[in-house]
Amino acid sequence: MAKRIEASNVTAYYGAFKAIENINLTVEPKTVTALIGPSGCGKSTFLRSINRMHEVLPGARVEGSLTIDDQDIYDRDVDVTAVRRMIGMVFQRPNPFPTMSIYENVVAGLRLNGVRKKSILDEAAEKALRSANLWDEVKDRLGKPGAGLSGGQQQRLCIARTIAVEPQVVLMDEPCSALDPISTLAIEDLIFQLKDKFTIIIVTHNMQQAARVSDRTAFFSIDKTGEPGRLIEYDSTQKIFSNPSQKKTEDYITGRFG
Amino acid sequence: MGETPHRSADAGTGGTRVTQSHEWPAGASARVAEAPVSTRTPGGSGLGGGGALPRARKFGAERAFRGLSMAAGAAVLVIIAAIAIFLIAKAVPALRADTENFWTYEGWSPNETEPKFGIGTLAFGTVLSSALALLIAVPVALGIALYLSHYAPRRVGTALGFLIDLLAAVPSVVFGLWGRDVFINPVRDFSVWLNTYFGWLPIFGGDGPFGRSILLGALVLAIMVLPIITSLSREVFLQTPTANEEAALALGATRWEMIRTAVLPYGRPGIIAAVMLGLGRALGETIALAMTLGITFGISFNLIQNGGNTIAANIANAFGEANETGRGALIASGLVLFAITLIVNITARAIIYRRREFTESAA
């Protein structure tokens, strides 16, 4: 239930603007990888190119190769929806479907895959909500709107929705930036548990968070605005935060810039 | 869980293990910490005011505007009440003079010495032609709106949207003339075809003549309400939060599945409102139907034979030669149309209200 991701020479554009350039990095199965770096350095762009959400924007495109267990996800014959089912995504702001109940939100992905049987849906919903540490809080109000939950609960609902389809990889784009510290902690605990089953890549602005939850950390940066973002250093989290080999990394994590 | 970093750049979401290192570089955080102290100048009299609190103003722009908007709101009520009183005052004498049952009599001869008129057939024709028009227009309009908002390249979408809006500006008499003189020919051929192959269905039965039928009227109406429904639902679809669309796509939805999961449910109240506005126009449409319908009195579900009539079309056709009682009778029919529209709108509100728990949190 977890696969290796390999990016080689990934370059992504928004129209004529080159947002990231020549990113090379390998993510091992069942690990948590944190992407850190100053705003605009392309870490979210890179994350979104892993499940081909980058190309949703008009004019956006990706060059280079991205493979998941040696299968090129940008291959011409690959069904983009299959890629996104295999590589789930949690967004910066909680985005449950506003017209759907908690239950319907969780099973939305399964329904899209054509699952109709009530018993299967019920089972999957409970499993996903339990995995997302949300079951006890919502089990008595599954029919209520998902948007009625608190921000932290909504984000866990979105995580439940993502893992309900049992992806191989879960991408998280600053999942805690809209949450208070307690909800953040709940999500971090959850990430730690989910690592048993999924490969997780998380973009975060919070370096403590990166240090707490990740096994490996990738530091992205830009020289100046308008330049493409580059991968500066990619190593074990411990190494990055205690003894980075690049000066830029050290400057960033010690707060000298960014 | 890795090692705690030297220092947090944004400790806001840090939570439990915030540790600060000893050597603070002259970074941003240090300056932020002392910022509040330096900006708060004691005793200053800026916009915040330094002296005693002034008294609230009794008269001012705030109050004046409040009064103005309240007067505008009240004016609506007064106008509606005045119209209602006038209409009822005119209608009641005519209704008293009616020698037949106003609800069930199939005919309209209010100008005789013994006035006979009934609203039943007209109300039936109004509802039937409008319902049929919506049945035809809504799927097409939603299709166009979705194409414009989610499929077409932005330029094409804008240009087409503009054309659609232009269609709404065509006067209804033009539609009526076009329907009566041009569009009637293909519709007649189509009616004959329907009659030949589907004549066993009562709605397509009859022996002719065909053409100036409910079908023609409804088709013309459908074209007329299309732009309203299209442009309103297009606006609604465009307002779907990107976050929800991306959530659906990230779950592996195709574009159509994304529309079904995120766009249509979100736009539901807006779609209902758009359809109701279209229905309002269809129910009240006068001249186009007066020109395209066969103008008969009788309740029939047959869609393709010459015939059909509506309340508004009847008013347009009969007002010219109406006497005092005749005008009263037409005004009474107008009140019935008003009531039908009201019922339709209340129903629509009820549908939206029933799901408010979900739609309110959507806003």
Image (tube, rainbow, N blue to C red):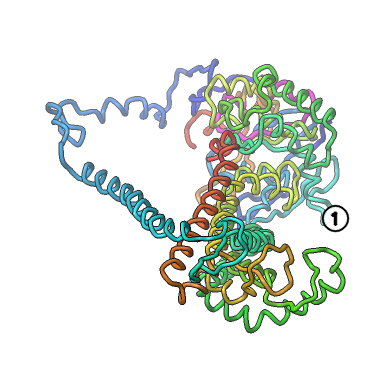
Q: Is residue B111 visible?
A: yes
Residue furthest out toward the bottom: B181
- Looking at the image, residue A170 lies above or below residue B317: above
Q: Relative to residue B262, is residue B22 depicted above or below?
A: above
> Where residue A22 sits in the image (x, y, percent)?
68, 49
In the rendered image, residue B201, in percent from the top left (x then y), is placed at 83, 63
Q: Measured along the vertical axis of the image, is residue A141 above or below residue B208?
A: above
Q: Where residue A214 sits: x, y (%)?
A: 67, 26
Q: Quadrant of residue A111?
A: top right
Residue A91 magenta: no
- Identity of the residue drawn at 31% across and 51% down: B75
Residue depicted at x 85% and y 43%: A70
> What amino acid is found at the position of numbered circle 1 in the picture?
Asp
Q: Is residue B246 left or right of residue B72?
A: right
Foreground residue among B98 and B343: B98
Q: Can residue A36 be seen at all in this image of the molecule?
A: no
Instruction: Name the residue tied to disc 1.
Output: A77
Displayed quadrant of residue B307: bottom right
Read off the magenta span.
A191-210
Quarter of the figure with the N terminus of chain A: top right
Q: Is residue A207 magenta?
A: yes
B151 vs B119, nearest the viewer: B119
Residue depicted at 52% across the width and 33% down the height = A251
